[in-house]
Image (cartoon, grey):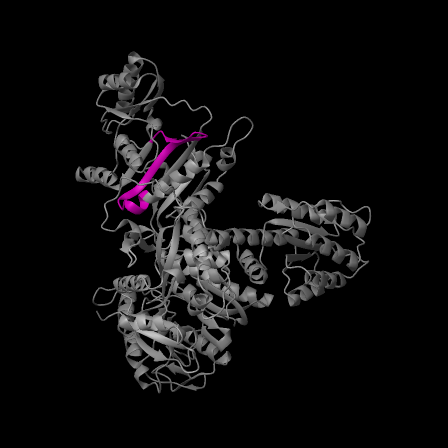
Amino acid sequence: MSQRHLDRLFHPTSVAVIGASDQAHSVGAVVMRNLLAGNFAGPIMPVNPKHASIAGVLSYPDVGALPVAPDLAVICTAPPAIPETIAALGARGTRAAVVITAGLSRQKGADGRSLQQAMLEAARPHVMRVLGPNCVGLLVPGVNLNASFAHAAALPGRIAFVSQSGALCTAVLDWARSAGIGFSHFVSLGDSADVDFGDVLDYLAADAGTRAIMIYVESVSQARKFMSAARGAARNKPVVAIKSGRVREAEQAAASHTGALAGNDEVYSAAFRRAGILRVDTTAELFEAVETLARARYLPGERLAIITNGGGPGVMAVDDLIRGGGQLAAFAPETMAALDRALPSIWSHGNPLDVVGDAPAGRFSDALRIVAKDAGVDALLAMHAPTAIVPAAEVAEAVIQASKETRKNVLTCWLGRDAAAPARRLFAEAGLPTFDTPDSAVRAFLHMAEYRRSQELLMETPPAAAEDFVPDTAAARAIFARALDAGRIVLTEPEAKAVLAAYRIPVVRTLQAADGEAAVRQAEALGFPVALKILSPDISHKSDVGGVALDLEGPNAVRRAAAAMQARIARLKPAARLEGFTVQPMVRRLNASELILGVATDPIFGPVVLFGQGGTAVEVIEDRAVALPPLNLGLARELVSRTRVAKLLAGYRDRPAIDHAALQRTLVQVSQMVIDLPELAELDINPLFADADGVLALDARIRLAPTSLRAAERLSISPYPQDLAEALTLGSGRTVTLRPIRPEDEPAHQAFFSHLKPEDVRFRFFGVVRQLSHSQTARFTQIDYDREMAFIATAAAADGTAETLGVARSISDPDNQQCEFAIIVRSDMKGQGLGSALMRKLIRYARGRGTQTMVGQVLYENRPMLALVERLGFTLRSMPGSDAVEVRLDLTRP
């Protein structure tokens, strides 16, 4: 249901309190007190059959007796009464409720259903939205709504806070009030039976009164919905998250290294990073990050300059910066010369820039102005320790004035308490982030840098995967089918390597042998030396039981190794089935790094791709990173960069860098396996050799899990819908391809825009747009296929490159009730039926998704477009006071 009736929840005009009370300290009494004390402008109607009035307000015996249908009901009654109450409210016309009562999921009604399920089923016929149960409630200071049992009211502000923990809600509310921090919305989700993170993030993303969003997450239930909403919100405003449960408790033993390594917390971090959300560790950091990001200007890079009147605090700041992975700016020669002219000779002559303890306000501001002009400086941190020579507030005023002359971010840190308080007030009024200590100031800058990286990842246009990558998906599926038909969920090593080969991943040649003598014959066919491994469906890690022998020279060495392995397995794993051996040639790649690349299935976010340093000690080394598929080359590169082994892969001393393109391509190929093969539950490639000559998989393991889902349905991010591509022959005889847009289409999209006439641009954008910025074009080409679709017409240009000829786009509301469309065709391609073909394809797609209505606006002057939509069945409606026509198509009609 998503956004349906959330306006009634967050901006009601009337409120009923079901279970209102005069009993001191009861939830019903506190909710009534809070609503009345908040000066809510609309009617507040208590419902309690035992009282004529509650808190001096006329009370009503039941929902039916209410004089008007309340927009919002706050329910504080015992669990058994709630489903019936929801049904009565829905029948009366109420469309939103806050259920504060706990325990509904644990209690069952007479029919055996949980009371929570009964509540949801009672709400469904009325499309009634339910916040909770088991929540503190919600506060919207902008409309004076305090529909909660919180102990304190929220100050008005422009930060939204959404939490699954009621206890944290009240603690944060208390802390924020004492710090003077206000909120646009303060939402306790509770058990999220209906309204969840996805719903609230969608709502807040479009709320003009909210400039930043904070979320406290314990768990996510609908991963794809969460990811879509979070990515959309993060494109519009900063979203900062704190997630509990970082430490891994006892977990089920996994059948692979990947399954053991890809822990729950790492997957959440990967999800937040992919969504453009900044993750922090503490509630103090949460507020610091939100305040900093909400006030921050564009950060062009990550090089920080530190200006201070005290050497000690400056060195502490540098320590914190470098330990946190930050960069210290190096001053240009002209900057050094300018500083020499402006500062005493005893200044520090470097970064941090120590202007000396006796620095007057003018010296501070002069230094800031000079450093801000340095192209090698991306942000500045001004630090001041109190002295008896110059008042701290006077220096603060000088810094504020100097900061107005630069577009670069200026952070401030005024040390001390009483002496620094007036300066901090001045900074707050001027909108400059200010901090008490060097470590908190540097942490804020590091948050800005991390946020910048996440936003760049959202806007990045990576190159496409190699065009010659065409996997043999049918061969891989056939291997899976044979194993499952035989009742096996773990592939043999040769089968696993055959799957990798089907996806064009280089593998070492591997032969299967039923016994020791067969192994000898296979070794002779391959040539010595060879590696011998046991083949058993019951042993996950062969090396743990001595099931791997390397560098075997000659038939006798193979016989002895096979016999020793059989004896060892019989002693250590007597119940294990030994189906024979695998034999492969020894691979000599002296400069190769041993890596691990794999897939695991997270119970919430579905398949994840893991990369890190491999080998037998992989769990001990714990150098890995995870990412959510689908991956492209840019995301693969970013995944590798988050590991320690990435520095080794770049090369050092006489060891050359590995073939990074081959490694990134392999990650994308594994991602494609996840997209194509729904039964793929776990994959281990360990070790994966990587060197300057490419990559080679030496060992592989695949575990299957039968499923009725399509592979793409398991992913938390919708993959590219390749099946929607089709060929079209235009009236001119030219063949074009109609397909969904891809991120790597950005250069062609820029070129497409340059071919448009000014009139065509005005018809599409309703104004003059001379060129599209990178961020705008990235937004057009990087779309969430769950909510948006853009079909492009593309064909080969004269020089052999692909060119974009037209695009039709639709964006659905989160409920998929209505989509808004837009279309534009290259000026020299008109009159060939391309616009009609794109519109028909867009309409078929929207109908197939179950969207009910397609709407758009067309300028009166755009007669060809008006004629086209009329032919396609749209109805036209004039818009008073506008030079546009609203066009609307009922998609429920054939």
**Residue 280 percent location from the top left of the image:** 51, 53
Which is more toward the observer, 599 or 508? 508
Residue at the location (31% across, 38% down)? 503
Which is more toward the observer, 485 or 54? 485
Q: Is residue 205 left or right of residue 94?
A: right
**Residue 283 percent location from the top left of the image:** 53, 57
The vertical placement of 203 against 596, above or below, is: below
Quadrant where the N terminus is found in the figure: bottom left
Q: Disc count in the image?
A: 0
**Residue 639 percent location from the top left of the image:** 45, 43
**Residue 25 percent location from the top left of the image:** 45, 73
Q: Residue furthest left?
A: 485
Tell whether position 684 is magenta. yes
Residue at the location (26% across, 41% down)? 473
Which is more toward the observer, 427 or 108? 427
Q: Is residue 595 left or right of residue 770?
A: left
Q: Which residues are magenta?
A: 673-699
The vertical placement of 383 against 94, above or below, is: above
Which is more toward the observer, 140 or 762? 762
Q: Is residue 306 left or right of residue 640?
A: right
* Residue 231 image-quadrant placement: bottom left
Tell whether position 291 is magenta. no
User: Does residue 24 appear in this view?
Assistant: no
User: Does residue 877 appear in this view?
Assistant: yes
The vertical placement of 451 against 111, above or below, is: above
Q: Is residue 238 left or right of residue 873?
A: right
Q: Residue furthest front?
A: 732
Quadrant where the C terminus is found in the figure: bottom left
